[in-house]
Image (cartoon, rainbow, N blue to C red):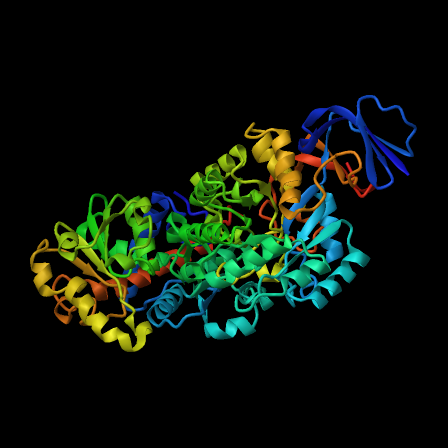
Amino acid sequence: MSLLIKNGRVVDPANKIDEVRDVLVEGSRISRVASGIKVKADTSLDASGMIVMPGLVDMHVHLREPGREDKENIASGTRAALKGGVTSVLAMPNTNPAMDSVERIAFLQGIIEKTAHTNVFICGAITKGRLGMELTDMSALKKQGIVAVSDDGASVDSEALMVEALKNARENNVAVICHCEDKSQSAGGVVNLGSISTRLGLRGISRESEYARIERDIQLAEKADAAVHIAHVSCKESVEIIARAKKRGIRVTAETAPHYFSLSEESLLGYDTNLKMNPPLRTKEDVAAVKKGLKDGTIDAIASDHAPHTEHEKAIEFDRAEFGVIGLETELAVSITELIVPGIICWDALAAALSLNPARILGVNKGTLSIGSDADIIVVSPDQKWSVQKENIASLSKNSAFLGKNLSGVVTYTICNGKVAYQSAG
Amino acid sequence: MVWTRKDLLGLDDLSREEIELILSTADSFKEVSSRQIKKVPALRGKTVVNLFYEPSTRTRVSFEVAAKRLSADVINIETETSSVKKGETLIDTGTNIQALNADIIVIRHNYSGAAMMLARHLNISVVNAGDGWHEHPTQALLDMFTLKEKLGKIDGLKVSIVGDIAHSRVARSNIWGLIKLGAEVTVCAPEILIPPAIEEMGVRVSYDIDEALHDADAVNVLRMQFERDGQNAFPKQVEYFKNFGITKERLQKAKKNIIVMHPGPLNRGIEISSEVADGANSVILEQVTNGIAVRMAVLFLVAQGEGQEK
């Protein structure tokens, strides 16, 4: 089987390509990237006027299986991923039960094998049950196939345990992803602490509860001589702390989510629970700082933090509603709308943030259009507009922060492992 | 000025003109309560449901009296908050009440934003009788009505709000309303009871009660809720009274005719001394009386509201 993608603007930061080229796929791999490839391929796609780039590697996805298949499952989540141009996801371990043992990971791998529509990498838990008390057997989990560990949803409060985890991760070559939150400071909070929490009469989550824990985790990584990755960066101070640490040569990487560079706390004035997530939407100044962090490379990656919840878990009082928003289907378009259209970053940097960098952080061989690499490719119509409508969401849950919003950039084709796995209707 | 809103959710949303319309409508309803037969047929055939998720006597009774003086039929539903978790959702409760062809729901809820959420999901009117720490618009309206009655105007008045600002819906609604009507507002409390960035609502912050009272035309004294603190409450109460309690001595240093308001129920000897609560400057019972007129006005107006927003 061969597939030829013709005349697209190929954006491949790994090979420093940003030019009109043809891409030839043979079997499941990329075999040529060149101008004017004259081959009679089984399938030929005209990508004139479109962007051809590596499929997205979303390193922060909650697929909810096992445990909450009513919110999402491997099949539905990865179908939504394809629609959003995502060809690889990292499944976070806060399932029920948590991914903290070889048996559970083997079980999950069985489901992935049978039902996934994209590549699914697994993130194991740092501690058993994600309770922060006892470390998981990281080397055994690694042998079983995990690429990263995280207690996402919680931070490991014990410094001693965290240092130990970072050392284990270094020895086992596993990425450590930190959900940085000091819950002693943030408990009970539901929105950013500041003028909006005051105005709405809601408990606030301070910025300090985030950035103080980032500062701590960076220090611990330095102590353990290990790399550390900071999840969902939302505020200015966090960006500054990470920038300083990078300057000092500490091996820290960071991701943010599209809602942190597109929405600010003012949009919460109507108590819309689809805008409730953790960390919370911050101020306009923070949004600007996150954008700047993406522009200058302080923030390496964009990940959705796709967190599906059922309608009845959201259509309740703001305090009681679940934290989290879905994002697989909108992350590329929000990034194009907020970062490319206003000229904040170029396509090369965007492809790096969405594909190459997360692949590198996780140590997986994805995110490039190199010859011989897995043919995970997307074709994007960059100027095409669309509106986010509940009826058109593929995810089982509809809790998008962008409902009703008009976005630029439509995924026209998603090619996963050499096959056209998704094609837009329009 | 014509009232077009289906709901009254807070004073944050309202324009100065809308607030003035409620106050002038209340003015015309006030006289009804002093008649021999305290009833007008304005809401005859309408059904008002008081849906209270938090214990409240005075607000609930005030709304009930107001609705009855307008000839509405009134149903009271009082629900323990704890059972909400097990039982039906607020939206389901609301749609069920709507299905009974009720016309107005008056809701008191312990969570901020509950009234707004309910209003968004229903076609019938929703009146916020207090949601969490967010807003208690009719309380602020009756406070302003009383101030206007006593001092002739709101514009240019200096009003100090004293007490637990952070957790007070009464404070928030008063701030929005007073500022829109041109008053200068000072909030005064120990630092831990002042929420962050409160200045952005347009108020001045003071940590010194004497300073906050100096020059003030009126002081609105909030209820302190130490009962939540259990056995630690007593020393804190004494401490609070010493530093922030409104006493005769403190008032003697303020303007002679300073108006003293309190939304009730009173904690005598904690936030206010009995001498002050019962003294010549106090308008606390007049507030209660005015509450009826203000709530009659609100019920009357939302019942006329065309629902043009939705």
Q: Is residue B89 above or below residue A293?
A: below
Q: Is residue B167 left or right of residue B268?
A: right
Given residues B242 and A258, the one toward you in this image is A258
Q: What residue is shown at x 29% (from left), y 69% (from top)?
A: B225
Q: Is residue A392 left or right of residue B265?
A: right
Q: Is residue A275 left or right of residue B170?
A: right
Can residue A314 be seen here? yes
- Which residue lies most toward the top here? A36
Given residues B138 and A250, the one toward you in this image is A250
Give the position of the C terminus of chain A as an image quadrant: top right
User: Residue B11's spot in the image, x, y percent?
Assistant: 37, 51
Given residues A347 and A423, the one toward you in this image is A347
Give the position of the N terminus of chain A as an image quadrant: top right
Q: What residue is shown at x 46% (from left), y 59% (from top)?
A: B115
User: Residue B259's spot in the image, x, y percent?
Assistant: 17, 57
- The number of numbered badges drawn on the structure is 0
Can residue B122 be seen here? no
User: Residue B23's spot in the image, x, y percent?
Assistant: 31, 52
User: Residue A414's spot in the image, x, y percent?
Assistant: 77, 40
* Residue A48, image quadrant: top right
